[in-house]
Image (cartoon, rainbow, N blue to C red):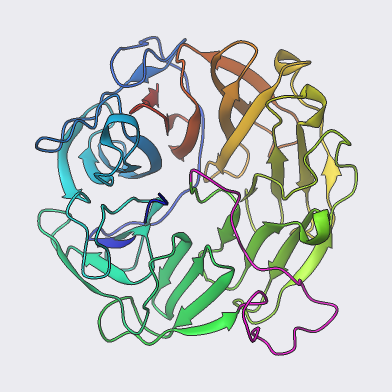
Amino acid sequence: MKKLIGLVLLSACSTMNPGSSGSGDDDGSGGGGGGGTGWKAIPLIDDGNVQRSGNDLVTGIYFASPDDGYVVTQGDMGSFGDGGAVFKMTGSEVKSVAFSGKDGGPSELGGVDFVGIDPTPNGLIAFAYSADVIESTDHGATFTIQKDGNLAGIEPLLAARVTASGTTLVRETGVVSTSPSAPGPSASFTDVWAPNGAPPTPNPVPANMCQGGPLGTGAPVTRSSVYVSSDRQTIAYTSAPNMDPQICISTDGGTSFLPSILSGIPDASTDGPSKGIAFANATTAIIYAGNQSDASGTYIQRSTDAGKTWSPVALPSGISGHAVALNGAFFAPDAQHGWIVGYDFDATHALVLSTSDAGSTWTSEELASDYKLYSGFALDATHVWVGGEAGTLLAHP
């Protein structure tokens, strides 16, 4: 049965930063196992009678400062069917369940599973599905759940960006929707891009534009395949119409998307869309994909012209000849330090690739965890967190 996913607002006054790496010497325990050199494992806490630790999939992490953070999850393994949760944490400890998704919402009869968490001008948004919004105006102490404007779907959100000028939602059904206001009961959303619709938006879709919308990359639902800039004007997503891998890019807030056709993709790749896309800054970005059955199908490519063209970069020697999954990527605010998280099937360990030159070169590190990583966040070049299966949450340093 398909799991369902929703939309959450928390309160915080902060700005968003994407990922990083640091150093330390405590490998910790709990959660999805120990971390590895310099990584400390942080266990989740339970949610009433729902055991989150050792079960939930950690899909999103956000920190406003080294000791002021949030983690969002999807129910998995022993918590499957109970939805996920929003956790409040310090840099080294999960302190409380800020919101439980086990009871669903106005539009959701099952549990609420979260895809990610980002700041807004008035707080934070933990996004899940499109029809409902959960809001806190006291930094996560209390919440209300209510309808999100005129939206009716319970399809997962791949991205949700809120600014002073409005809201952009990217839905897994291939739709980009915008509102001139913040999410909430009075919001009015318009579908500005839906090439897979019947009829499509725009109608017809011009021949020079992308012919497929943002459909994600399968289960579990993550945010890896979509990027929305802080001003909501640049939107990019991975796509592969007719098995032709490309990156679709909008610079007008989602009204139009032009394809950037990829070359140099390994023959052993699946011919499907790249697993993910991440921007270090307005002009520098990476795309990536792993292959769990054929090592030659893994690739990383880099752009320095805002995604118009892409060039392959060398994979780190540590994963040479290994079958790997590359599941998520993020950059630090310095736009130089960045990470790709995933799993090494040959080594049977969690995997982190890191760069300190904006994606030009990469090194690999096997972590002492048996579970796949899917998410991460870096407050700066010395404070980084990653998360994944079985409640895995690791801090560095």
Q: Quadrant of the C terminus?
A: top left
Residue 41 location, x and y as percent? Answer: 34, 19
Question: Is residue 117 inside the magenta stretch?
Answer: no
In the picture, measured across the screen, residue 59 lies left or right of residue 97, that is right
Q: Is residue 246 above or below residue 294?
A: below
Asked where in the image residue 150 lies, by quadrant, the reply is bottom left
Can residue 305 be seen in the rendering of this structure? yes
Front in this rendered view, residue 187 or 271: 271
| Residue at screen point 89% across, 36% down | 267
| Residue at screen point 59% across, 55% down | 216
Residue 224 location, x and y as percent? Answer: 56, 48
For the record, the magenta segment spans 194-220
Front in this rendered view, residue 177 or 251: 177
In the picture, measured across the screen, residue 58 lies left or right of residue 52, that is right
Residue 230 location, x and y as percent? Answer: 50, 64
Identify the main secondary structure in magenta.
Answer: loop
In the picture, measured across the screen, residue 122 lies left or right of residue 48, that is right
Residue 241 location, x and y as percent? Answer: 78, 61
In the picture, measured across the screen, residue 135 lies left or right of residue 346, that is left
| Residue at screen point 18% across, 49% down | 100
| Residue at screen point 46% across, 37% down | 376
Front in this rendered view, residue 6 or 10: 6
Q: Is residue 32 above or below residue 244?
A: above
Q: Is residue 369 above or below residue 329?
A: above
Front in this rendered view, residue 37 or 288: 288
Question: Is residue 195 inside the magenta stretch?
Answer: yes
